[in-house]
Image (cartoon, grey):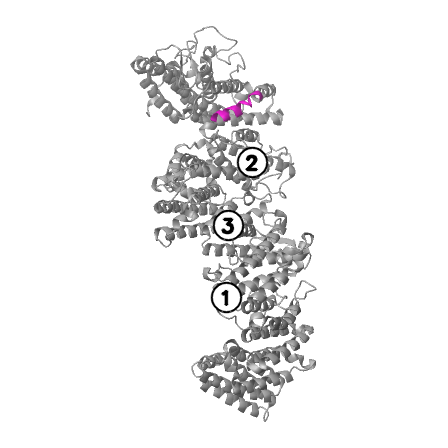
Amino acid sequence: MNMFAYLLGALSNIRFTSVSDRFAAELDAMNRVAYLRDQKDGEARLGYLIRGVQFLKLKVYPLEAFEDTADFISAFATVFEASRGSSVKTAMAETLGPLLAQVVQSATAEVNHPVWGKAINLILNKSHSMSDKPSKSRYWNSTVPLMCAAVGAAPQELLLPKWTETVDWCTTKLKEKSTRATMMLGIVQLTWSYLHRVREGASALNKRLEPILKTAFPPDRKNVYPSEVSLDTFVSLIHYILYWQLDYGTDFVLRSLLTYANDANENNQGLVAQTGAERIMIGITGSLRALTSLEKGQDPSYPTNDHHQHSKNCSNPHIIYDPNYAKTGESPNDGQALKPELLEKPRIKAFVDSIGTKVLQMAAYCDRTLAPFTINEDKYLTPWHDSIAARAETFDGPTVIKRHGAFAVEYPRHLQPTFDVLQTCLQAWPRIINSPASESASLAILLRGLVSLDVGVTIEAKLCLRRFLQAGKSFAVLQAYTRFLVKPDFLVRIKAHLQKGLDSKVENLVKFWVEALTGWCEHIRKVSVNGEDPDYASSPSFGAEGTKLLCHMEATGLVLLCSRSYYIRRSALDALRIIATARGILQEASSVTTPRSTTFNSTCSVTNLLVEAEKRLFDNLNVDDFSSVERTRLVKWKKHRKVANGESLTRLLESDNPADFTLLCFALSSIFSTSLVHLPATVSHARILLYGQLQRLYPLASDAAGVGGRSTVNGTGLNPGWDDRNLYMSWSSLLISVTSITTSTDPKTGNLSPTIDTLSNTSQSSSARERNISPGEDLIKTLVPFLTSDQPPFREATIRAMSSIHVSMYPTLLEGLSGLAHHLTSERKMIEAQKDRSARPNGTVKIIRLFSAIGKLHESTTKLMFHPEFVITERTVDILSKFTRETCIFLKSQQNLDDIVSLSIRKSFLIFAERLLRKVATVRSTRSSSSSSSSSSAAIDHDGLKTQSSHTQLFPKELFLDFYNLAEDWSTRAINSSSSSSSSSQTQFTHGNLNFNTNNGVAGNDGHPSRTGSLSSRANVSQRGRPSVSSTTISGDLLPASASMIATLCVSHSYPSLFILLLFSVSLVPNIAYVMGKIWGLFRRVIWTFGSQVAPRLDLKVVRIVPASVFHDF
């Protein structure tokens, strides 16, 4: 039925006379016929026809068109005046009201037409007769809008008398609860008509408006009246007064609506924020709508019932949006920045300044009140699920339960008005911000709003930030948002079941950051490259502040690469690419002013360093640092690298495979180390941010690792039975990144950045807050206890991180490890005293773990001795000698020879020894060359060690004998255990002539002459026997390391007989093609090194003692 009515309405816009005349004729005929036949059927048919009239388009201009309109309304009014039956009269009233509203909106002097005046009189008389008694209250919802529209469209001589009469009548009928919304809307409609059509002095204006305002906003209370009416109705009232009478409206808003939140007594502000919330929201929203109308230069639309359908019984009782505006761009609560030309008008600027100051003060108050109620507080959050959804729909207790993303949030109900006021304040920005200081303060409130418990505040804060970006405030937004994004509270949750929801929240925050970055980059491109702004060079983006912001954003991107979320890492890479583009734009603009204190390379960025970082990563990888699954992935990555054209590192950072995590940690170390060389200013800021993140995690990680005084093994830690990877992954990635860029020149203070909120006061215990992680050189001391952790993930993460230190921190690391020397000495005797491994106390197991960790660290960090910036000192020699002696004594223990736990210690020690020998050989050769060219017998070498002779040894000769003795002993034991059945048939070899000491005496009871004179020959002499470790394990892990170490000893110290002994020993082991291949290559190095003097003798001995079948495959 409505389709035909719509069609007729569209036709009336073209052929109004034809359509309206036909409607009038049909109405008159049917109205007469309806009472001659079946009354019920006739009234129903007449009702359909009447309601079809509402779609007609009445015209006011030109005058001829208005005359047609007046004739039609006159005919309709005649039918209305003669109508009978409840349904017909109701349909007539509900149809005439919207028709008259079309005329009220645009007509002025035209309404003085005689025909129109007569029709209005008929309508007013009929509507009053239908509403004059309380018994006829059933008609009020239909007749009141009609009466108000008729008054608004009345001729000038009828307007004021009828206006006063109708306002008074509507006010008296507010006592009827069922029709309060209709009566209040009628009063607002009458106010619109009065302000639109009448111009009176201030006294007359106040006389007419004051009773209305006192009714709606009673002076003796802070809520509005009637309370059942939608707030949008009251907003419209303020909107109209401000638009047509700005001075009068401003005075009322400041005096009666926006005064309490700022001018009230400090002790009563909480009560004011609750009871005065409605007035505050009405005042702010009405002001925004008035500014929108003033900016457009268009009169506000006449209020109709369709615009005010919402009541306080809906799901959000404080909704104040006009539902008539479906499109976002047409929102009446527009918070976009005002046009500059509008602010040039003194009255409007004064209004914006006064309202803006009040709004900022109220927003600041709400922000302070709601500061503890954020999603960073676990106690207010629960994962959302169906049972909570059912409870939230029916719950009416002292708390509010709402859905907030993946969470269900619950907070005290009395805070809801404060949340609503804050949300309304955010709607006003940046429209009514009047100064740079206000802009900075509002951005700080907005950023905290992003993590508010109330989802409405969160959504509005994000929309407001977008309005700032559209207003050209991207630089200020990025400055504040970049600092906000790396707050440690976003990093990890104590309650693991909340982590997923938090990750989703942080991902959205990072996504918006990338969006803001993109907008800023496009902005600086337009104003500089495209020449849209000739004065762009004076803007902050192109000065020192822009340079500083680039460094901070790039540092933030680096920190976000440490996230365990692959989505965040992807977004961080996008951000770094945009930053690189921005660097190029600033360079092209040729207006970058770099402070002397800041190192800025406009052509270098993190993304440009990824190729170098990738090469550094894969060149320095050690497969022993990976598990079997991770090694498989490592092989795939190496294959992928050959065809990836330098994109392997990028794809690794974007990988979501858990098996890539260890490789990812080493990748982060490579990226940060490379950036430290090329982007020191960026890395300096990143270091501060990383320490802030670590400070948040340190108490949690130390408890989970069992080194914080509450061991998880005993069930007294933070999270007994800890199996959550979130904390471990975050700790590992951040820790290795920090150690990679921590240098010896960093400040030794725990308070790196007071602006970073490193700990949550409510989520951390007081004891946890007292524990701080120290930066700089003290970082090593802080991490040493993690080497003894009962939790392998944390122990391995610490070893990885400490193995990735900067070269300047190597002496500090050695000092830290030397501090454990007294533990190694005292506990060694206790280990020997334990006959049965199962009887060892827990402390002894920790010492063995410590031995293993220290050995691994020495193995991994000895490569730093070859770094060009490293200077070996006497203290370094002393520390390494002490570690070597203690480890030799420990490993010669009978118990440790039979212990599989010490296998990793042996292997690490062999690799360490091999590298140490190479370093000693390098120093010796350098000294020899320097001494030969020196005219003085006493010189100071380039390594900083005072020497009397170029032949002075850095380490005692006996120490190298210990190296060989251990390797020879382990190899022989493996041979004996694997070939005991066939050893009698093998060629016998005598060690008796192998003595590298000038003293040929025998020390102690050692049956091996080669041990004579060694530092550990008189202690811990082991007896030959079958080890508990399988020969396959020893052969596969120790023999290659032994081969490398002894070969290096031969090359660096001219001990060819040692090399021949090793060849003989390993030739007895079956299936050793891999080992022999390794040794044969080293053997060729020996021949090349010693030349013709040694090679014939070596060849002769090899042919004589090594079976030919061994070399068949080579």
Tally of numbered tags: 3
**Quadrant of residue 1083 in the image?**
top left
Q: Residue 357 placed where, x, y %?
A: 57, 56
Q: Is residue 343 magenta?
A: no
Q: Nearer the viewer, residue 817 or 618?
A: 817
Q: Which residue is mark 2?
A: 751
Q: Is residue 625 left or right of residue 1052?
A: right
Q: Main secondary structure of the magenta part?
A: helix
Q: Residue 603 placed where, x, y %?
A: 36, 41
Q: Nearer the viewer, residue 1041 or 545?
A: 545
Q: Name the element at disc 1.
A: helix
The magenta-colored residue range is 810-822
Q: Which residue is mark 3?
A: 509
The three-letter amino acid code for the residue at tag 3 is: Leu
**Quadrant of residue 988 in the image?**
top left
Whether residue 1068 is visible to the viewer of this picture, yes or no, is: no
Q: CA distance from mark 2 to mark 1?
A: 51 Å
Q: Name the element at disc 3.
A: helix
Label placed on residue 294: 1
Residue drawn at (53%, 69%), measured in percent from left and top?
324
* Sooner in the amino-acid sequence: mark 3 or mark 2: 3
Q: CA distance from mark 3 to mark 1?
A: 35 Å
